[in-house]
Amino acid sequence: MTDPMQFPERADTRAVWLFTADLPIEALDEFKARTEAGWPLGEALGADWLNPDFVEVFAPADIAEYGLARYLTEANGMDPDQVAADTEKLGALSKPVVLVYSQALSGRQGRFDPKPPLTFVGRYEAPYSLTPAIPLPGFESTSGIVTGPSGPSSYTPAMRRALILTVLGLALLAILVWGLA
């Protein structure tokens, strides 16, 4: 990863960008709100076209018991080795944090260009798991050739009788309905 602010080249890459916001907690709602006048958070990130459904803003104290490092790894599936390198730094954060998930990018190319009050903290990615599937052992039920029916079946006398009774019933019902009308 040469430029942590760069959006991933692969559209299927799951990543989280972490920023801190140098704002009082009371100003967070106004900062993250999208209005007709604009979106201050998107503008501060340098990408106001992001999908806000995949952007989180909260105070680290809100998850202090759980911990930000644990939140990134356990709740969001980011690479534990990558996050472990920053565990102390993440535990020391006291300013509000902004998490931007790769799903917010809508597959676009580019990079973040954060402006105050935002400060970049780190980028964390989910590990790829490309484990090949192991072939299942053969079973008796999965071997051999299954033959299907030889062709369409002919009407049996029981089916013919049921068909005649159904047609007669429908005719009787039609006569009753016509007689009541």
Image (tube, helix red, strand yellow):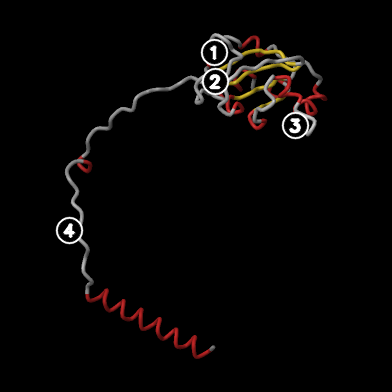
Disc 1 residue type (three-letter): Gln
Q: What distance separates the C-alpha of mark 4 from that of mark 3?
A: 66 Å
Residue at image mark 3 = 34
- Label 3 neighbourhood size at 10 Å, few (<14), some (14-19), many (20+)? some
Residue 152 in the image: x percent, y percent?
22, 63
Residue at image mark 1 = 82
| Sequence order check, earlier mark of 3 and 1 | 3
Looking at the rendered image, the disc whose residue lies closer to the viewer, 4 or 2, is: 4
Q: Which image quarter: residue 76?
A: top right
Relative to 44, 160 lies left or right: left
Disc 4 residue type (three-letter): Ser
Residue 74 in the image: x percent, y percent?
56, 24
Q: Is residue 14 above or below residue 160?
A: above
- Label 1 neighbourhood size at 10 Å, few (<14), some (14-19), many (20+)? some
Looking at the rendered image, the disc whose residue lies closer to the viewer, 2 or 3, is: 3
Relative to 49, 8 lies left or right: left
Q: What distance separates the C-alpha of mark 3 from that of mark 1?
A: 32 Å
Looking at the rendered image, the disc whose residue lies closer to the viewer, 4 or 1, is: 4
| Sequence order check, earlier mark of 2 and 3 | 3
Is disc 2 in contact with disc 1, using a CB cutoff of under 8 Å? Answer: yes
Q: Which numbered marker is on residue 134?
A: none
| Sequence order check, earlier mark of 4 and 3 | 3
Residue reaching furthest to the bottom: 179
Residue 51 in the image: x percent, y percent?
64, 30
Residue at image mark 2 = 78
Disc 3 residue type (three-letter): Arg
Q: Secondary structure at mark 4?
A: loop
What's the residue at 69%, 19% (across, down)? 46
Residue at image mark 4 = 150
What's the residue at 78%, 34% (across, down)? 36
Looking at the rendered image, the disc whose residue lies closer to the viewer, 3 or 1, is: 3
Is disc 3 in contact with disc 1, using a CB cutoff of under 8 Å? Answer: no
